[in-house]
Amino acid sequence: MKEKFKNSILNLPEVIKLLIIYLIIIVIILSYIYFALEDDIEVFLIICLLLSSFYLLAFVIPVLSLYFNYLEKTKNIILILENESIRINDKIIPIIEVININIIGTHQHFNLGHGGVSTLPYNDSFYYLKVKTNKNEYYLTSLLSYKLDSILIEKYPNIKFVQNINSFPLIK
């Protein structure tokens, strides 16, 4: 049975959801502050600027950095998982040639539901996999599928998977 994956931001629904939720919270806070301050528009504008800057720096810029990094490193990849091989575009990698697959992600990605609390939108959604063979290394990212690591672990139980925790899993 073949499974086919292609890069898409739509593969990261939790990230999009969290960004929208945080934006709504900021809009509600700003609305409350606007009505509480009544005539002091200068203070409101300063608070608005500070909250907007915080939102951009803490939430949007890290997500965009990881997204564009992953897109640059794995642009135009089509991944096809077959029973005895992994196909990355036109390159066929027999499963017996795979030494291991390193999964690089945050602590929250590996421990979600087991004490890991995700406060930043990228924590459990952005991760990448480094597929090591005898000859090469290939990078696959969560842009291909939000659950790509789980899918690979289930499909190929004989491959050694290594979890590597990184607070900001940028492909270098």
Image (spheres, rainbow, N blue to C red):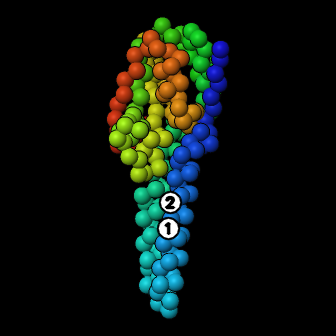
Residue 50: image location, x then y, percent: 42, 72
Position of residue 59 relative to residue 127, above or below, is below
Q: Position of residue 31 (x, y in %)?
A: 53, 76
Residue type marked 1: Ile
* Disc number placed over residue 4 in the picture, else none: none
The residue lying toward the viewer, choosing from 76 and 61, is: 61
**Quadrant placement of the C terminus:** top left
Task: Say which quadrant the N terminus sits in.
Answer: top right
- Give the residue drawn at x 46%, y 62%: 55
The residue to which callout 1 is attached is: 26
Q: Is residue 114 above or below residue 121?
A: above
Res. 135 visible in picture = no
The crowd level at tag 1 (other Cα within 10 Å; few <14, some 14-19, many 20+) is some
Residue occupying the far front of the picture = 114
Residue depicted at x 58% and y 22%? 88
Q: Position of residue 70 (x, y in %)?
A: 51, 39
Tell me the residue that label 2 is attached to: 22
Foreground pick, 102 / 138 = 102
Q: Which residue: 41% across, 13% down?
A: 99
Nearest the viewer among 150 and 50 is: 150
Label 2 vs label 1: CA separation?
6 Å
Hey, what amino acid is under mark 2? Answer: Tyr
* Residue 71, quarter of the rendered image: top right
> In which image quadrant can residue 169 be found?
top left
Which one is in front, 151 or 36?
A: 36
Residue at image x 63%, y 32%?
Answer: 6
Q: Is mark 2 in CB contact (under 8 Å) with mark 1?
A: yes
Secondary structure state at the residue bearing disc 2: helix
